[in-house]
């Protein structure tokens, strides 16, 4: 018996709402709130059971506090944007509820995401007896849990991790992003960064690339990027010597991105247009397809997982833990594409573990800080089966 307030009615918010509605044994009352009420109501109409909907500007803690006081949730799930993380954490502290999100805070005027702003809330959450679970989507989220599971079940120490994110699907648009375009393009156009032998190594954006043979998909070119789970896993995996993150992109996507960058459309600083300031990337977001609209004709699969090299009883080994997800199957089930689905399902599972007390303690945490087994058991039950493949040797990732 628990009440959950979901903030954000985009691609991921839709999946989280569907999945919480399916888990009626735990989530007895659901409220979906977002900036645009019509989007909440459209999702509510897809469900088999009634939920409450509300309009909310999550940048204003006082508005969120008022909604929390009227709905009285046990947990607030933030699936709006990373810009809202701190305002929603403040509101949760003020109104006395737990908090969960899937992407770490970044300031709107600087494309730089770091956990330091949210980790700084640790003592306040601990003292208030409240919990915040950070980054509980797929990557971050399940990628961290795969590492914790490998450490529990397969290795005494983990020496190297490569997180691989492959979307081999096709949505039929010349250019679209699978999650919020503004956040996605800010992330991809940043300098690359990975951790090796105790220090961070920077690379030019998308300059390092390798091929990997993805199970159920085949060989795809993937590009090294910085991703937020690297920061927490470096802190939480003792003995780690190297960790990197790779994402696949097709030539068509990269060509569009290059052109958009070259003409200045990915800039995040305001420019003067017809007497008023606009941010080019925000304007670009307004003309690109919304992630929640991509599902209908999406075909193909995703494969997201971790290549993990470790040692058990002095013997080295390598495993690939991964999930394969089919875009069309996701659409049939919850009217969403696989990127929203693979993010929304772990959010619901994390929420379930928090509200049922299995993963609950006061403070601010990342997913790898908890016992991975209850989470791994629930993943296939809610639509994300996983596979552990032993590799005879580490793949040639350089
Ligand atoms: P969308 O753009 O589809 O949805 C974002 C939603 O948030 C929209 O409904 C938007 O409202 C709402 N919103 C934005 N600002 C506010 C505000 N101030 N107050 C209230 N609501 C607001 O994005 P996605 O659903 O694709 O992504 C959601 C989150 O999930 C992002 O933070 C993204 O980074 C994260 N994510 C995490 C992944 C992981 O694996 N960990 C993977 C993919 C995404 P409106 O419709 O009015 O604009």
Image: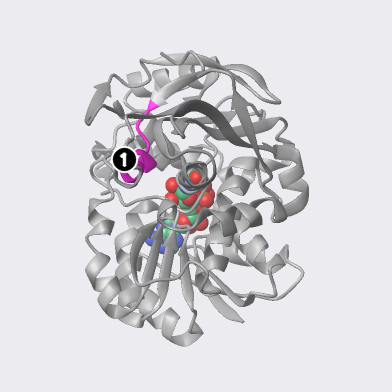
Instruction: State the residue at coordinates (44%, 80%).
Output: 67
Q: Position of residue 326 (x, y in %)?
A: 71, 37
Q: Quadrant of the C terminus?
A: top left
Q: Position of residue 212 (x, y in %)?
A: 55, 17
Instruction: State the residue at coordinates (23%, 52%).
Output: 116
Which residues make up the magenta segment?
225-233
In reply to whether residue 93 is colored magenta, the answer given is no
Q: Position of residue 35 (x, y in %)?
A: 46, 63
Q: Secondary structure at mark 1?
A: helix
Q: As displayed, is residue 377 above or below residue 263?
A: below
Q: Quadrant of the N terminus?
A: bottom right
Instruction: State the residue at coordinates (39%, 82%).
Output: 66
What main secondary structure does the magenta stretch of the protein show? helix
Residue closest to the far front: 313
**Camera-side residue of 103 and 382:** 382
Instruction: State the residue at coordinates (40%, 41%).
Output: 182
Q: Which residue is the site of mark 1?
A: 234
Q: Position of residue 323 (x, y in %)?
A: 63, 38
The coloring applied to the image is one colour
Q: As displayed, is residue 334 above or below residue 288?
A: below
Q: As displayed, is residue 129 above or below residue 111?
A: below
Query: Local crowd at mark 1 within 10 Å, few (<14), some, or many (≥20)?
Result: some
358 displayed left or right of 299:
left
**Visible residue check, residue 42:** no
83 displayed left or right of 284:
left
**Visible residue check, residue 244:** yes
Q: Classify residue 167 by image quadrant.
A: top right
């Amino acid at each position: 018996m628990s009440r959950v307030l979901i903030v954000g009615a985009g691609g991921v918010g839709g999946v989280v709402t569907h999945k919480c509605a399916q888990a009626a044994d735990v989530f007895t009352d659901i409220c979906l709130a977002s900036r645009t009420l019509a989007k909440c109501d459209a999702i509510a109409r897809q469900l088999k059971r009634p939920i409450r909907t509300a309009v909310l500007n999550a940048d204003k803690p006082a508005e969120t506090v008022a909604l929390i006081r009227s709905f009285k949730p046990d947990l607030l799930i933030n699936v709006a944007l990373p810009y809202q993380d701190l305002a929603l954490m403040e509101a949760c502290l003020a109104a006395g509820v737990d908090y969960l999100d899937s992407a770490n805070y970044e300031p709107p005027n600087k494309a730089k995401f770091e956990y330091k702003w949210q980790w700084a809330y640790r003592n306040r959450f601990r003292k208030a007896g409240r919990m915040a679970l950070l980054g509980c989507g797929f990557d971050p989220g399940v990628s961290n849990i795969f590492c914790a599971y490998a450490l529990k079940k397969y290795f005494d120490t983990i020496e190297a991790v490569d997180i691989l994110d492959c979307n081999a699907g096709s949505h039929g648009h010349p250019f679209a992003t699978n999650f919020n375009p503004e956040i996605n393009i800010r992330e991809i156009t940043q300098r690359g960064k990975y951790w090796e032998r105790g220090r961070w190594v920077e690379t030019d954006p998308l300059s390092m690339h390798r091929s990997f043979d993805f199970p159920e998909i085949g060989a795809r070119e993937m590009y090294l990027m910085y991703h937020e789970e690297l920061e927490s896993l470096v802190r939480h995996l003792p003995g780690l010597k190297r960790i990197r993150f790779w994402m696949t992109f097709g030539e068509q996507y990269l060509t569009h991105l290059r052109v958009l960058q070259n003409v200045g459309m990915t800039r995040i600083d305001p420019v003067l247009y017809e007497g008023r300031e606009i941010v080019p990337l925000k304007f670009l977001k307004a003309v690109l397809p919304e992630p929640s609209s991509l599902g209908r004709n999406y075909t193909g699969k995703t494969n997201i997982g971790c290549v993990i090299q470790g040692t058990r009883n002095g013997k080295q080994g390598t495993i690939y833990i991964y999930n394969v997800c089919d875009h069309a199957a996701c659409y049939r089930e919850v009217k969403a594409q696989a990127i929203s689905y693979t993010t929304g399902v772990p959010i619901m599972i994390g929420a379930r573990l928090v509200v049922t007390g299995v993963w609950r303690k006061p403070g601010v945490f990342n997913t790898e800080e908890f016992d991975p087994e209850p989470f791994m058991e629930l993943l296939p039950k809610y639509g994300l089966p996983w596979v552990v493949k032993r590799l005879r040797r580490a793949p040639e990732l350089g």
